[in-house]
């Protein structure tokens, strides 16, 4: 079918339904209110002019709370194109007993008044119903507007044809019920990120999970090469929002696909909430929304705190358990088959700590999945953080098989365990200030050549202190660390084996020397730290 025929057919279909499409009310202005206006440095109240793309609807919205029978408005203003707001002349919340009430509507200033009317509530009828309004306005809209809009529809139809012909794949937006999966992209080269700069992924539709709930960015918690991580508020909960610039689209896409695979819900993997695209064109931002953990990364925690032997064991055990689950191929789950996944950027920055110091693994932007009968694609082997790169990665001599990639992760685990040991109070003697692995040898910003010289040619590793050998548990941990960062990849321990070793260490030390267990000593308290540096 030629382009002209497709345009004509589109015009016919749109004109057939144009009465319904064009008969909607147009929202130009909404009542504006923001209870957090001082913190966000906005106006407290007023009238907001609604702007947006010409082919998208605009709505008004309101959010409020019911505190002991008293109504407290949270926010009012303009709302982007949302199918849940279509043709709603009144702002009505219909959900049963929400914590925060939310409604949206179409029409100028329609959010000035808002109501709560749950669907379960029966509608009361009266003996004298009000007569319906005369349909004069509707008659004019149905008869005049479609005729006047034919020229606009023709131009719009041709634009839509051209747009969909060149469009990026469908936007990735999860729902609460099911995650829509996209095919895995074959190419993972860095050149793909460069080509992404010239490929417009298209306008973001409303997210079924996030689009109906106001998401408020509060403060930046970390910055890095990918962009930044924000602490945000989603209704009454705190969440983390990782914002990628357009040039890192490949990393965002890969991380989304990993998070939404079967079996990726685990206590020791960072909980995924949703993904969205915000803005258009050069202002496009790619968002990943995850659980928020106030203690931050293991790196940030060890900078400000030392750990007891029990705390070291708990962090190490839960980190190893999460990585073992990630590495495992698990068929027969309720939601499908979970393949083995290699992280490829294990480091203390990518291990987050919950309030009870349980570890969870984050940042799957470089992760690789290994599915039976499928190639891992055109994978660039020399990726990750230089300081944590295994010898074979630094040499560029990787065997592109599943076990080879899993062993690369285990080398990095050995370095993270060393970081924990260096800040543990269990051994007799002073605890050193926190240092990154190889910081003594190559400083804070090593080049690839620096790491090749130290790790590959000189076969050096971070120093294991003599005083650690005098503590039963730390001595066993040192042995485990050495087996993790072994120069020969085939000799390294698996993540499951590390988890078992840590359990044995803790059990043995609790039996032999319970008096050695020391409670945590917080070195820095009541200090406001600057935004945490990150290389996620």
Image (cartoon, rainbow, N blue to C red):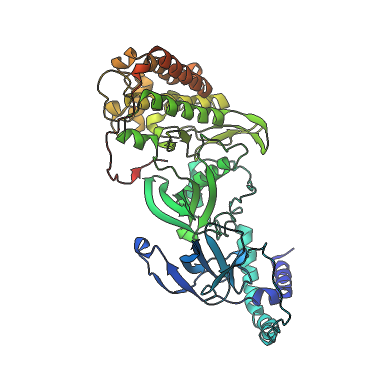
Residue 29: horizontal and vertical position, in percent?
A: 50, 76
Q: Determine the residue positioned at 61% across, 68% down.
A: 159
Residue 200: horizontal and vertical position, in percent?
A: 53, 57
Q: Quadrant of the N terminus?
A: bottom right
Residue 471: horizontal and vertical position, in percent?
A: 34, 15
Q: Is residue 264 left or right of residue 2?
A: left
Q: Is residue 336 left or right of residue 82?
A: right
Front-most of residues 314 and 337: 314
Q: Is residue 524 left or right of residue 180?
A: left
Residue 320: horizontal and vertical position, in percent?
A: 49, 27
**Is any part of residue 401 visible from this angle?**
no
Q: Quadrant of the C terminus?
A: top left
**Is any part of residue 210 visible from this angle?**
yes
Question: Residue 167 sits in which quadrant?
Answer: bottom right
Q: Determine the residue positioned at 54% across, 43% down.
A: 254
Front-most of residues 26 and 248: 26
Up the image or down, 162 lies above or below 378; here it is below
Up the image or down, 157 lies above or below 306; here it is below
Number of marks drawn = 0
Up the image or down, 315 lies above or below 73; here it is above
Front-most of residues 147 and 289: 289
């Amino acid at each position: 079918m030629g382009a002209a025929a497709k345009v004509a057919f589109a015009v016919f279909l749109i004109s057939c339904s144009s009465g319904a499409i064009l008969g909607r009310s147009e929202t130009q202005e909404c009542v504006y209110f923001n209870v957090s206006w001082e913190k966000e440095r906005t106006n407290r109240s007023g009238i907001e002019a609604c702007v947006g793309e010409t082919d998208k609807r605009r709505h008004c919205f309101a959010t409020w709370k019911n505190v002991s029978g008293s109504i407290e408005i949270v926010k009012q203003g303009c709302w982007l194109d949302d199918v849940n707001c279509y043709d709603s002349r009144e702002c009505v919340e219909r959900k049963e007993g929400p914590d925060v009430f939310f409604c949206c509507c179409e029409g100028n200033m329609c959010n000035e008044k808002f109501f709560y009317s749950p669907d379960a509530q029966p509608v009361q009828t009266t003996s004298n119903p009000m007569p319906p309004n005369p349909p004069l306005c509707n008659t004019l809209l149905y008869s005049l507007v479609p005729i006047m809009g034919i020229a606009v529809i023709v131009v719009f139809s041709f634009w839509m044809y051209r747009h969909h012909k060149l469009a990026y794949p469908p936007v990735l937006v999860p729902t609460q019920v099911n995650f829509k999966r996209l095919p895995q992209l074959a190419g993972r080269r860095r050149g793909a990120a460069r080509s992404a700069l010239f490929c417009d992924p298209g306008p973001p539709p409303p997210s079924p999970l996030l689009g109906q709930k106001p998401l408020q960015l509060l403060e930046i918690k970390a910055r890095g090469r990918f962009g930044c991580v924000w602490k945000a508020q989603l209704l009454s909960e705190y969440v983390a929002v990782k914002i990628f610039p357009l040039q890192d689209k490949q990393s965002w896409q890969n991380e989304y696909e990993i998070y939404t695979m079967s079996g990726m819900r685990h206590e020791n993997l960072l909980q995924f909430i949703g993904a969205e695209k915000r803005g258009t064109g050069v202002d496009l931002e790619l968002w990943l929304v995850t659980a928020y953990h106030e203690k931050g990364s293991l790196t940030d925690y060890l900078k400000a705190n030392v750990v007891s032997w029990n705390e070291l064991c708990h962090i190490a055990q839960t980190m190893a358990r999460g990585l073992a689950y990630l590495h495992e191929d698990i068929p027969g789950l309720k939601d499908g088959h979970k393949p083995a996944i290699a992280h490829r950027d294990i480091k203390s920055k990518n291990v987050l700590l919950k309030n009870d110091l349980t570890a969870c693994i984050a940042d799957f932007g470089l992760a690789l999945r290994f599915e039976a009968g499928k190639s891992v694609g055109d994978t660039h082997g020399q990726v990750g953080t230089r300081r944590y790169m295994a010898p074979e990665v630094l040499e560029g001599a990787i065997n592109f098989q599943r076990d080879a990639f899993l062993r690369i992760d285990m080398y990095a685990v050995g370095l993270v365990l060393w970081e924990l040991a260096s800040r543990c109070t269990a051994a007799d003697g002073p605890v050193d200030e926190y240092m990154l692995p190889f910081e003594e040898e190559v400083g804070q910003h090593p080049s690839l050549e620096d790491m090749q010289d130290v790790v590959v040619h000189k076969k050096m590793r971070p120093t294991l202190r003599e005083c650690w050998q005098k503590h039963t548990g730390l001595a066993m941990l040192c042995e485990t660390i050495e087996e993790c960062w072994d120069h020969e990849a085939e000799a390294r321990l698996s993540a499951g084996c590390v988890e078992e070793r840590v359990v044995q260490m803790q059990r043995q030390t609790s039996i032999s020397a319970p008096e050695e267990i020391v409670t945590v000593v917080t070195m820095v308290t009541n200090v406001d730290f600057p935004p945490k540096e990150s290389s996620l």
